[in-house]
Image: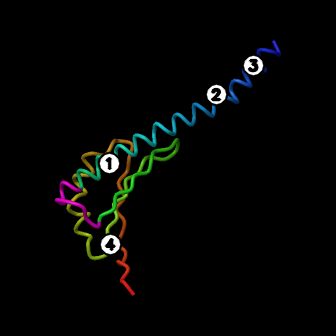
Amino acid sequence: MMEMLAIALIGAVIFLPLGVRAWIDRKESQAERLGAEIRAAVNRKLHGESLLSVRVTREGLWHPGRVVLDAPRGYEELTQAVWPTVVRRLPADYELVVKAGKDIPRAA
């Protein structure tokens, strides 16, 4: 009986971290795929690359995934133009965050 318990404990120590890592990798892959899809949709909507940044954070056990739209101060209309497009592509377990614009650094 003790041998079976020892084997189960050693198996859990080895395979539990592998399972958790596989789950995290799958969630990160899904977040990267979602980020690429949203960036492509934003670029289509704005007819090319822009100053709007799109960051996607994977969901965790206790928090939802997050999509962050961020544009510099003075370019807030970019986020206003694309947020409906982004919301249509968001899964139910993700939230959309629109950050206030920051000043663009000027050359010295």
Real-space CA distance between mark 4 and mark 1, rounded to the nearest whole angstrom: 21 Å
Real-space CA distance between mark 4 and mark 2, rounded to the nearest whole angstrom: 46 Å
Q: Name the residue under label 1.
A: 36
Query: Which residue is at a point 24% across and 61% down the rendered structure image?
Result: 49
Q: Where is residue 88 in the image (x, y as percent from the top left)?
A: 24, 46
Using a 10 Å C-alpha cutoff, classify the residue at mark 3 as few (fewer than 14 neighbours), some (14 to 19) or many (20 or more).
few
Query: Which residue is at a point 37% across and 53% down the rendered structure image?
Result: 67
Q: Is residue 44 found inside the magenta-colored segment of the image? A: yes
Q: Is mark 2 on a helix, strand or loop?
A: helix
Type of amino acid under label 4:
Pro
Q: What element carries label 4?
A: loop
Q: Is residue 1 above or below residue 101?
A: above
Is 20 left, or right, of 108 in this rendering? right
Give the dominant element type of the magenta stretch: helix, strand or loop: loop
The magenta region covers: 43-51
Real-space CA distance between mark 3 and mark 4, rounded to the nearest whole angstrom: 57 Å
Lower sequence index among marks 2 and 3: 3
Lower sequence index among marks 4 and 2: 2
Type of amino acid under label 1:
Ala
Residue at the far right: name it.
2
Lower sequence index among marks 3 and 4: 3
Residue at the far bottom: name it.
108
Q: Name the residue under label 3.
A: 7
Q: Name the residue under label 4.
A: 72
Displayed quadrant of residue 54: bottom left
Lower sequence index among marks 4 and 1: 1
Q: Is residue 7 found inside the magenta-colored segment of the image? A: no
Type of amino acid under label 3:
Ile
- Contact between marks 4 and 1 (CB within 8 A): the answer is no
Residue at the far top: name it.
1
Q: Nearer the viewer, mark 4 or mark 1?
A: 1
